[in-house]
Image (tube, rainbow, N blue to C red):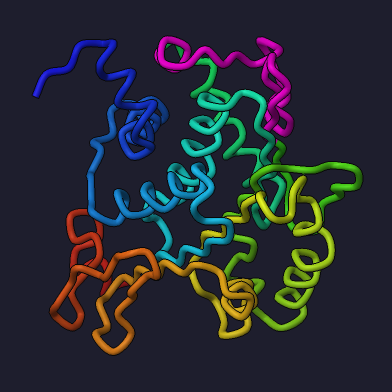
Amino acid sequence: MEFSEEEFAALQRSHLGVFAERCFVHLNPGVKYLHNWHLDLIADRLEKVARGEIKRLIINVPPRSMKSIMASVAFPAWILGLGPTKSLICVSYSQDLSDKHAEDTRAVMQSSWYQDTFPTRLMSKRPSAALLKTTKGGVRRATSVGGTLTGLGADIILIDDPLKPDDARRAARKSANDWLDNTLLSRLNNKQEGAIVIIMQRLNEADVSAAALELGYEHLCIPMRFEPQRRCRTSIGWTDPRTVEGELMFPDRFPETQVREL
């Protein structure tokens, strides 16, 4: 189906998944975009966060499943496009990784197609990746687990991979959990209306995901292989569509031979 430029721009404004695909193409020139149902699902949940229907969300997905482009790059750019006064704090396990996500967000927001789609503009033509400010007062801050946030607040806190696999041992895991509990979660501008999103692979039975689950977060769990006894059913109307034990999540990108190697 063919769309005019105006129709495609409207589609990107109303559907995060469509916008995220455009971000992927922009950031990965020459790389074929492979779509999968899990991307629609993640986009749907993040749209519900944007609308205020979900205030606390945890998404568990395998690594390399486009979660960061969707959650840490496309989602902040989309939120600021629709609401240029919004404030976001985006967190990853290292400042380098957090800065990379911010640089990608900046590249998207400074692109001609983004500016044809949204009226939002960044204050500077060469803004710091760690602190993207819009001309309307919105902001996307990038920080790492353990970073200083004194005096800063956000409408949405997005936590993308708060632990790297090598740090799943007890000391680093406890340090990350303590920082999230004692520092980051108090940064919401409005504790009732603000949203917290955690997206990560599971690394330990007592990782950040476990702490969030104990607090009653909405949980979206998409394992690489389908496990019937652990089929995810969310509280707002979704059930894992797979039916065969061991069925892969994303066979076009992660075929059986590659998953076995992993």
Tell me if residue 120 comes above or below residue 258 in the rendering.
above
Q: Is residue 90 magenta?
A: no
Which contiguous range is marked in magenta? 113-140
- The residue sitting at the right extreme is 150
Count up the numbered dots: 0
Tell me if residue 224 comes above or below residue 82 in the rendering.
below
Image-based side of 230 in relation to 155, left or right: left
Q: Residue at 37% across / 34% down in the picture?
A: 24
Q: Position of residue 78 (x, y in %)?
A: 49, 31
Image-based side of 95 in relation to 81, left or right: right
Q: Main secondary structure of the magenta part?
A: loop
Q: Is residue 136 magenta?
A: yes
Tell me if residue 171 comes above or below residue 24 in the rendering.
below
Q: Residue at 28% across / 34% down in the picture?
A: 31
Could you tell me which quadrant the C terminus lies in? bottom left
Could you tell me which quadrant the N terminus lies in? top left
Give the camera-side residue of 174 and 14.
14
Give the quarter of the image for residue 189: top right
Give the quarter of the image for residue 132: top right
Q: Residue at 51% across / 26% down in the picture?
A: 82
Give the quarter of the image for residue 227: bottom left
Q: Position of residue 158 (x, y in %)?
A: 61, 50
Tell me if residue 106 comes above or below residue 122 in the rendering.
below
Image-based side of 187 in relation to 5, left or right: right
